[in-house]
Image (cartoon, helix red, strand yellow):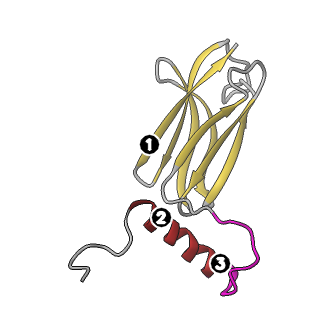
């Protein structure tokens, strides 16, 4: 018998979960519909282009709709620009930063950090403005 061992482990269990979500989202045929990648935890994917001169696009994903904040900070930890704040939808999202602060002034070239806070998760990525 199988004893107390799980029937699916590791990669198989993730594949099974993905298939179950696709089945629930697109019906029972399993023939049509785009591939659905579930967002299981908040992700801050980084910025493109990086390094950048005038603007960059920051990509992130949230597992559920809820309160979140996406902001840019300088190396001293001072808030430079709030890109998104409030109730954000679940799934992938993007925010653009044009190298300005909250007052609309262009900030100097250098290293900054983008920070995503959502549901107890706190993630950060380096941004390089040249």
Q: Are marks 1 and 3 in contact (CB under 8 Å)?
A: no
Question: Secondary structure beneath disc 2?
Answer: helix
User: Based on the displayed image, in which of its 4 quarters is residue 10 positioned?
Assistant: bottom left
Residue 51 position within the rendered picture, expressed as x and y whole percent measured from the top left? 68, 20
User: Based on the displayed image, in which of its 4 quarters is residue 53 positioned?
Assistant: top right
Please indicate whether residue 118 sits to the left or right of residue 83 in the image: left
Mark closer to the observer (1, 3) = 3
Provide the residue designation for mark 3.
25
Q: Are marks 2 and 1 in contact (CB under 8 Å)?
A: no
| Mark 2 or 3, nearer chain start | 2
The stretch of residues the image draws in magenta is: 24-36
Marking on residue 87: none
Question: Secondary structure beneath disc 1?
Answer: strand
Residue 63 position within the rendered picture, expressed as x and y whole percent measured from the top left? 53, 60
Provide the residue designation for mark 1.
122
Give the alpha-carbon distance from disc 2 to disc 1, as whole Å.
24 Å
Q: Are marks 2 and 3 in contact (CB under 8 Å)?
A: no
Main secondary structure along the magenta-highlighted residues: loop
């Amino acid at each position: 018998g199988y004893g107390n061992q799980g029937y699916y482990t590791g990669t198989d269990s993730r594949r099974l979960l993905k298939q179950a979500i696709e089945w629930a989202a697109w019906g029972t045929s399993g023939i049509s519909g785009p591939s659905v990648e579930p967002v299981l935890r908040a992700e801050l994917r980084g910025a493109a282009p990086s390094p950048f001169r005038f603007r960059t696009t920051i990509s992130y994903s949230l597992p559920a709709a809820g309160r979140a904040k996406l902001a840019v900070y300088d190396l001293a930890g001072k808030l430079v620009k709030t890109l998104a704040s409030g109730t954000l939808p679940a799934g992938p999202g993007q925010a653009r930063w044009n190298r300005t602060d909250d007052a609309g002034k262009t900030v100097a070239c250098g290293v900054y950090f983008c920070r995503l806070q959502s549901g107890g998760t706190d993630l950060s990525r380096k941004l390089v403005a040249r």
